[in-house]
Amino acid sequence: MQNEYQLVINGAQVAGANGTFEVMNPATEQPVTVAAEASPAQLDEAVAAARQAFQSWQHTSNEERKQILHRIADRIEANAAELAQIITQEQGKPLFLAEVEVGGAVAWTRYTADLEIPVKVIEDSENKRIEAHHKPLGVVGSITPWNWPLMIAIWHIMPALRTGNTVVCKPSSFTPINTIRLIELINEEVPAGVVNIVTGESGIGSAISSHPDINKIVFTGSTPTGQRIMSSAAANLKRLTLELGGNDAAIVLPDADVDKIAEPIFQTAFLNMGQTCAALKRLYVHDDLYEPLCAKLTEIANAQTLGNGMNDGITFGPVTNKAQLNLVRELVDDARAQGARILCGGEPQAGEGFFYPPTIVADVSNGHRIVDEEQFGPVLPVIRYSDVDEALKMANAAEVGLGGSIWSSDIEKAQQLAQQLECGTAWINGHAEVLPHAPFGGCKMSGFGVEFGEEGLLEYTSMQVVNINK
């Protein structure tokens, strides 16, 4: 890792006008490098560069943009080892999972490259032809979180480029480095100004939200921040894609096979140490299976090996930052004080690093903070139910609705129940699976708009109807 990482504005590396800030390794609590602290004026420069570049980039052909995205994927692939190591050092996930993130970034870029932008023929009669075309919006502002810093940047940037937009990216200050490297690699393949990056916290995020020359914002993060972005975006009616907080519920039916479902439930609840928007975060289990499933999940949790993700044999890394660690600890302590059973974990690991072991919490229900609030960490509350209608009511009680799942041996019954879940994606016998060809987005307070597939691609365009009188 370099000693310092700079902004990328108009194809050039630029020092931060407000100096630098340290990027910490959550496994050691030690700085690993410094990144540039941009000023609001430098954001203006990045937006101006993107707007100027848009004048020509929007007119590049579909075939040219496809080829460029494939070359970007080649660049990511050639630098995969470096990118994975950076992710582990700044975000904390074990190296094998960081390698999965980089591999996913390559695959997603290639899939997006090959998507077609459709032209729909509305009418083609003797005297008239009407077509619906899709045109790029202009400058896209991308604001990304710290949990999957490379993958989510890819999700934001690649469809923007594929549809002919230009980009200004602002990553989380907890994990800016791999995104900076990504933008450096992209700039080896695109004209200057097409993709820019500004880092730091000098009001940059809010300035993006209200910037008059940004045409769309795509944001992945918390609901309160999404609400502020939506308010600020009103001035010039920016298009928005908001993928916000989730508190995903799963319902285990009494006919489920505990031995078959325990491992996938654990892995989808504790994916990335539970720091995944669409992770399983509330588990509703029928009386008949409650104790056996709790026992099996505890067994799997106790088999994990915590430690620095750069070390061999590590299966479970740290929480990414201290504030998130403190929230997890607070929610577990609150549950304990209200009589919950802490089946495993339940305390931060002593020593350096933000380590919290995988924790299973039993004998809680709706009304406990650990159930009602999104933990976004290595904790899974398990709630007992006796009637499936009661379970559905509890699952749907949350004000958010990103994902949900039903676990059962009866697929037809599971489908009927899944369609009653109030969420953007309902999985059956799985959870947290996002795919490049399946639209993904939330409902209620989990945001609006979708990512992925043709539907996600077209979120970066405006429709123009061409009405031809022959």
Image (cartoon, rainbow, N blue to C red):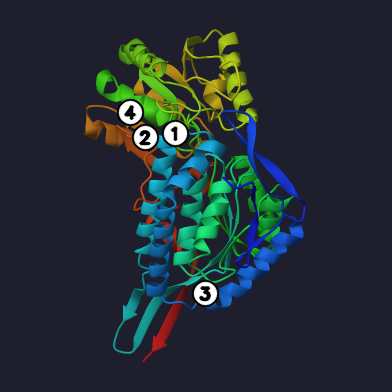
Q: Secondary structure at mark 2?
A: loop
Residue bearing mark 3: 57
Are dots 2 and 1 in contact, CB under 8 Å?
yes
Quadrant where the C terminus sits is bottom left
Q: Label 2: few (<14), some or many (≥20) within 10 Å?
A: many
Lower sequence index among marks 4 and 1: 4
Label 2 and label 1: CA atoms lie apart by 7 Å
Q: Position of residue 251 (x, y in %)?
A: 37, 26
Label 3 and label 4: CA atoms lie apart by 44 Å
Amino acid identity at mark 1: Ala
Residue bearing mark 4: 264
Are dots 2 and 4 in contact, CB under 8 Å?
yes
Lower sequence index among marks 3 and 4: 3
Lower sequence index among marks 2 and 3: 3
The numbered mark at residue 431 is 2
- Camera-nearest label, 2 or 4: 4
Q: Label 4: few (<14), some or many (≥20) within 10 Å?
A: few
Amino acid identity at mark 2: His
As drawn, is 320 to the left or to the right of 66?
right
